[in-house]
Image (cartoon, rainbow, N blue to C red):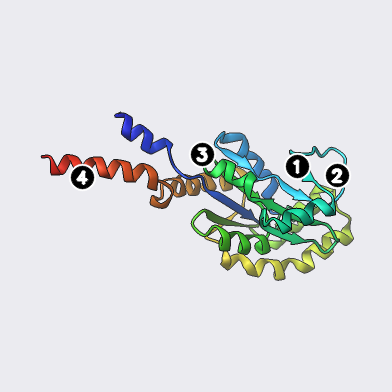
Amino acid sequence: MSDIIQRLRTIRRGVMFVIEAPSGTGKTTVIKKLLSQDSNLKFSVSVTTRAKREGEVDGVDYFYVTDEQYDKFVAEDAFYEKVDSQYGSRYGTLRSEVDSFINVGQDVVFDMDWVGLRQMKEKAPDDVVSIYLLPPSIKELRRRLEGRQTDSQEIINKRMSMLAEKMKHWVEYDYVVICDNPDQAVDTIQQIFSAERIKRVRQMAGLMEFTQKLMDEAKNG
Ligand code: 5GP
């Protein structure tokens, strides 16, 4: 393969993959599998003002900051998107963190809801690709939530009651994948990743160089 075609395949802009799903669909499992199978895919570590939970690691699960530090990020317009949770903690996605990957052709996966997605699409419309995972049925979703044994029946009932309200945002996503089993969902998402990575907008730098060379050659016979 000529050097220029090789370059074309390696210099491209990374993609921001936003994945969302109703709680219990298997989003965390799917994201972990995608990350473990794809060394070019990075997880976007968010900033949060909430306290670190047991087992969490600063810089891996979140960047834990004080309210003052968070306010400073807001004043500096350092976030791609930010959200206040109903429990009082605040979350945000740092531009610097994401851009350091995207600018060198690495893709980033985000675990965020439609509120964050809307802001991301506004700030980076050409870079964001969104995927909504759906459970195969509500019965199966409840079975999965109960099987997790992490939430009380009261919390499960609360999640179920909020489901329809959250799910109506599926139409805002580029792709909808039914998560019957996580491995199948991962395969489908990898096909989405492959197609999105070779889109013209992500390959502009390489394509400009390559098409210029072809046109020069055409002119010179
Ligand atoms: P937790 O505090 O349990 O880790 O997360 C609470 C919620 O905040 C989850 O639904 C998670 O997806 C969401 N979240 C975490 N980081 C961010 C972020 O940077 N932006 C947005 N919009 N949501 C986030």
Q: Residues within 10 Å of mark 3 (few under 14, many from 20)?
A: few
Separation of marks 3 and 1 at Cα, in angstroms: 23 Å
Give the residue at mark 2.
52
Give the residue at mark 1.
61
Separation of marks 1 and 4 at Cα, in angstroms: 48 Å
Residue at (86% x, 61% y) in the render: 87
Q: Amino acid at mark 2?
A: Lys
Q: Amino acid at mark 1?
A: Asp
Residue at (24% x, 40% y) in the render: 213
Q: With 147 as the anchor, is 108 left or right in this view?
A: left
Q: Amino acid at mark 4?
A: Met
Query: Viewer-proximal residue, 106 or 70?
Result: 70
Query: Viewer-proximal residue, 194 or 89?
Result: 89
Q: With 216 as the anchor, is 48 left or right in this view?
A: right
Separation of marks 3 and 2 at Cα, in angstroms: 31 Å
Q: Does the Cβ of the disc 1 residue fall within 8 Å of ligand 1? A: yes
Secondary element at image label 1: loop
Secondary element at image label 2: loop
Give the quadrant of residue 43: top right
Q: Earlier in the sequence, mark 2 or mark 1?
A: 2
Give the quadrant of residue 113: bottom right
Q: Earlier in the sequence, mark 1 or mark 4?
A: 1
Separation of marks 4 and 2 at Cα, in angstroms: 57 Å
Query: Viewer-proximal residue, 221 or 163?
Result: 221
Looking at the picture, how far across and down is residue 83, in whole percent? 74, 61
Determine if residue 22 is in view. Answer: no
Give the residue at mark 4.
215
Give the residue at mark 3.
104
Query: Viewer-proximal residue, 35 or 7?
Result: 7
